[in-house]
Image (tube, rainbow, N blue to C red):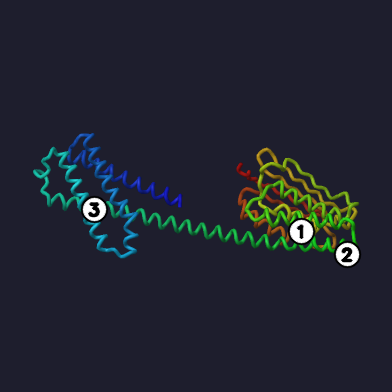
Amino acid sequence: MKYFAEYNRTTFIGFWGSVFIATFISFFTEYETSFGLSFIGSSIITLLLASIAYIYIHYYFSLSTKKNWLVIGLATVALFAISLVVEYLVIDWIYGGSLLSYYPLWKFILSCLPVNLFVVAVSVLLFYFGSGWMKAVQDKADLRNEKLSTELNLLKAQINPHFLFNTLNNIYYYASTQHPETPDMIEKLSNILRYIVYDCKAERALLKKEIESLENLFSLYQIKNDEQKSIIFEKSNCNGNLQIAPLVLLNLLENAFKHSDALLNDEGFIRVRAKVDEQDILHFQISNSVKKNGRKESQTGVGQENIRKQLDLIYKHKYDLKTELSNDRFHLNLDIQLDRKDG
């Protein structure tokens, strides 16, 4: 609505500025008046006609919807009668009180009334056609944003249950064996779910909370094999009020754990680095070994495609995602221009 107001104000001022210039030139050339008189006369007439147009713009449609045609007709006659009287007095003043000797009254009315009607009608039409066009543009933008929001929520819904079920399966396994680390695993999962439920509803979440969820996820997998030393997570400069689209990093990491053999193979590994530079660009890197009995293209399949769609929807040209899978090694590099939370 603010954009509509600015657009209509600009159109209104531009149109009536042109009317003022045309009226001024008419006074200055046709009536051969001085610069000062031409300026005053054209200002009065322009303001008068602009006021009539303003009244029509703000009151005509409210009256027409109530079908007050008699009121509309009488108001129209009154407004243009007033405009003719004021114009006559202004021009008569410029002529020094001798307008009738140059212009008979009937000739004055026939020459000024059509011009007044035309100018006011054009102004009203410009306003409403401009508003209608801008409203159509805004409605289209709102529809597109709603569609993007719906699509983004669907993409999130495709990923989160998979992560949850995998983690619950791990906890179930340890609970069934009465593993001493089971309560700690439940606490870590609870922290992750709290982040997903309460902090991921908005379009952005604090980066430090996303990083905390990564650390909790690392802990869950490290508990599964506490002798595994090749699961490494390094972070740098990830605090403060920096924001990121929620769940992007978390799902990338979960995808790496899903397809890595780090928990099964002594030579397997998962290495993750998250660093924010001085331009608030996050550099997120994942390197992991891949299960030899799995499809080599699996880690770059549906999960990666969903993440890329999310990034396209939210960041558009403000991110760069590169992946490479070769020799049973997967490498991912993601750069994102982060936002800062106000305040």
Residue at mark 1: 299
| Structural distance between the alpha carbons of marks 2 and 1 | 30 Å
Dot 3: what SS? Answer: helix
Residue type highlighted by circle 3: Leu
Q: Residue at x 89, y 52 (%)?
A: 226
Q: Secondary structure at mark 1?
A: helix
Left/right placement of residue 213 relative to residue 343 reads right
Residue 338: percent from left, percent from top: 65, 45
Q: Residue at x 48, y 59 (%)?
A: 139
User: Residue 41 location in percent, x, y?
Assistant: 22, 40
- Give the mark count: 3
Query: Residue 79's mark?
Result: 3
The amino acid on which the numbered mark 2 sits, given as a three-letter code, is Ser
Comes first in the chain, label 3 or label 1: 3
State left or right for residue 264 relative to residue 295. Answer: right
Q: Which residue is mark 2?
A: 176
Q: CA distance from mark 3 to mark 1?
A: 74 Å
Name the foreground residue: 75 vs 253.
75
Q: Is residue 93 visible?
A: yes
Residue shown at 57%/61% (left/top)?
147
The crowding category of the residue bearing disc 3, from other C-alpha atoms within 10 Å (few below 14, some 14 to 19, many at least 20), is: some
In this rendering, position of residue 151 left or right of residue 190 = left
